[in-house]
Image (cartoon, rainbow, N blue to C red):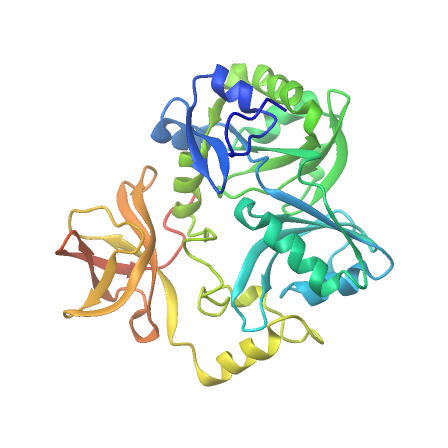
Amino acid sequence: MPEQKSNLKRTPLYDIHKGLGAKMTTFAGWEMPLEYSGIIDEHLTVRRAVGLFDVSHLGKIEVTGPKALDAVQVATTNDASILSDGQVQYSLSCDTFGGIMDDVTLYRFSEDRFMFCVNAANREKIFNWLGENIGSIAEIRDKSSDLATLALQGPLAQQLLQKVCDAELSLIRYYRFVLNNINGIEAILSRTGYTGEEGFEIYVAAAAAETVWEMIMDAGKDVRIRPCGLGARDSLRLEMGYTLYGNDITEETTPLEACLERFVKFQKQSFIGKEALLTQAHEGIKKRLIGFEMVGRGIPRSHYPIHVEGRRIGEVTSGESSPSVGKFIGMGYVETQFSNPETKIEIEIRGKMVEAVVVKRPFYKKT
């Protein structure tokens, strides 16, 4: 790990990013690459070919022991009991009021070993929260510093990765993973990602991160692989209508408000936040997360007010130009009665009301 020159954290790939001339940015306490060749170029590369991201800032927390499954069931809204070994599940962890502590991907290695992949900003919060709530029935370990994570995303990702590993990648279904290798270096190969494209998230020992990065980049030269930064990762996920923690979901929002109710399994015996969410479902949801497209000219930004007929009904949580769709798009919370597609709304941009319309997500649909 390179020497720290500030209080910002750095991934094991920091020196590579600097060597590639990446424009760096601060994100969740980390010094991370924002872009290399440009956000639009990197975005379109992932849509058309393949790009490689460093997402080692994400937290990795293991839950182990004979009652690991019971512990995970208490800590997540989805039903982990349906998972088989080598399967991944998108889920949420909520507080007792139903507020979203984090959205997570949950990996099942065996009945007594699971791994949470959590947002970088929530790593310490979730580790402590898991310890407080399920630490009495399972062992909780923070493996974040031990593992680096690379995201290889794009329609050519499988073709490229197959060159450097032994696993038959075509047999790995979506949201499944295998323990394999990258040219002999032990790796977890997971068919997951947050771009809406084919791809893999690759977990390797932190000490091997630079070697694996170079192997993949070298193997991808003939398909014009690009290193990609957080800027393209954000625009790619927004085009798919995926939520970003800290913007679209927080402890002040619930899964029901965020249109994530399909990941809440009320049939489970118990999970933290269940009673609060049942009460909200019974009483009715007062606000909902929407997607919208701009009709007038203007870029929607986080916290911009949303209006209908001169009355404020909510605010923007995410918004920017969509390179794939060719429109300005965004998401935000509005009063539930205004959340239906084709509802006309206005975004207040620097004091000016600009027309927009509610649309179904995702904004970008692959042909």
Q: Whole-percent x and y of residue 361?
A: 39, 56
- The structure residue drawn at horizontal position 14% and vertical position 69%, both measured from the top left corner, is 310
Give the image location of residue 345, x and y in percent.
21, 63
Residue at 77% of width from left, 36% of height from top?
179
Question: Total marks drawn?
Answer: 0
Considering depth in this image, is 189 or 115 the residue closer to the camera? Answer: 115
Q: Is residue 164 above or below residue 233?
A: above
Give the side of residue 294 with respect to residue 91, left or right. left
**Quadrant of the snapshot with the C terminus:** top left
**Residue 81 shows up from this direction:** no
In front of the other: 239 or 36: 36
Q: Position of residue 182 (x, y in %)?
A: 71, 24
Lateral position of residue 17 relative to residue 329, left or right: right
Q: Is residue 330 depicted above or below 193 in this figure?
A: below
Pick out the residue farthest to the right. Answer: 66
Q: Please name whichever residue, 147 or 335, is drawn nearer the observer in this view of the structure.
A: 147
Which residue corresponds to the image point at 48% horizontal and 19% vertical from the top-left?
Answer: 18
In this view, the residue in front, 186 or 147, is 147
Q: Is residue 274 above or below residue 92?
A: below
Q: Is residue 219 visible?
A: yes
Query: In the rendered view, would you say 7 is above or below 362?
Result: above
Most extreme residue toward the left is: 352
User: Which quarter of the rendered picture does the N terminus lie within?
Assistant: top right
Q: Looking at the image, which residue sits at the far bottom?
A: 283
The x and y percentages for residue 209 are: 65, 25
Q: Residue at x 54, y 71 (%)?
A: 98
